[in-house]
């Protein structure tokens, strides 16, 4: 018997990463809704890829941080705006006000040290396209038309509906 795990044709890792990035979006959205004020001792360290698609930061910051940068949202930030794709925020660097635009896909870490909460993310490739793969052997039209059949190797193929209970 082979102990290796087969490659998945479902991009579970990408789906989980996207769902966890949505947590960041919801948290930042709640801060925006509350007027841009963090409750209690909460503060956020957000690390992101400076060269990722959609990141808009001043050239001076991109030069200082050519790969990755961490910002802190605590006391002195303003104009936090959150949408489905990412967020923008005003921060001060060397006493100069700057606006940063950061897509959620560029984030590699989100930490709230006040409550010992943190998320780590895999970096999204610049292409954004999944690598091509061969079609699965059961992707033929005949297989889709016969969902509950015994295959040639004797194993049963079963369809499962994860819909709501009726």
Image: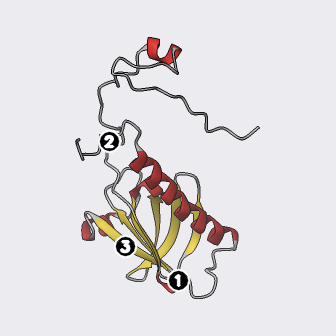
Can you tell which mark lies on residue 115?
1
Q: Which residue appears at 32% of the width and 63% of the height?
A: 59
**Which tag, 3 or 1, sits closer to the chain's start?**
3
Read off the residue under disc 3.
Answer: 70
Work out how far the residue at label 2 is from the one at label 1, CA to CA, in angstroms. 35 Å
Left or right side of 103 for 32: right
SS state under label 3? strand
Work out how far the residue at label 3 is from the one at label 1, CA to CA, in angstroms. 19 Å
Read off the residue under disc 2.
Answer: 127
Q: Which residue appears at 23% of the width and 41% of the height?
A: 1
Left or right side of 16 for 131: left
What crowding class fits label 2: few (fewer than 14 Cα within 10 Å), some (14-19), or many (20 or more)? Answer: few
Are discs 2 and 3 less than 8 Å apart at CB?
Answer: no
Work out how far the residue at label 2 is from the one at label 3, CA to CA, in angstroms. 23 Å
What crowding class fits label 3: few (fewer than 14 Cα within 10 Å), some (14-19), or many (20 or more)? Answer: some
SS state under label 1? helix
């Amino acid at each position: 018997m082979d102990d290796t795990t087969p490659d998945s044709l479902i991009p579970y890792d990408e789906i989980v990463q996207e769902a966890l990035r949505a947590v960041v979006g919801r948290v930042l959205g709640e801060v925006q809704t509350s007027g841009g004020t963090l409750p209690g001792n909460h503060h956020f360290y957000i690390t992101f890829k400076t060269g990722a698609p959609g990141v808009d930061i001043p050239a001076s910051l991109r030069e200082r941080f050519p790969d990755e940068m961490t910002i802190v949202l605590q006391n002195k930030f303003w104009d936090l705006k959150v949408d489905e794709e990412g967020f923008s925020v005003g921060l001060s660097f060397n006493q100069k006000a700057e606006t940063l635009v950061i897509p959620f896909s560029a984030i590699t870490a989100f930490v709230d040290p006040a409550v010992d909460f943190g998320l780590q993310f895999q970096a999204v490739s610049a292409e954004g396209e999944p690598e091509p793969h061969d079609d699965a052997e059961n992707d033929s039209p005949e297989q889709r038309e016969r969902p509950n059949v015994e295959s040639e190797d004797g194993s049963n193929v079963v369809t499962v509906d994860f819909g709501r209970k009726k």
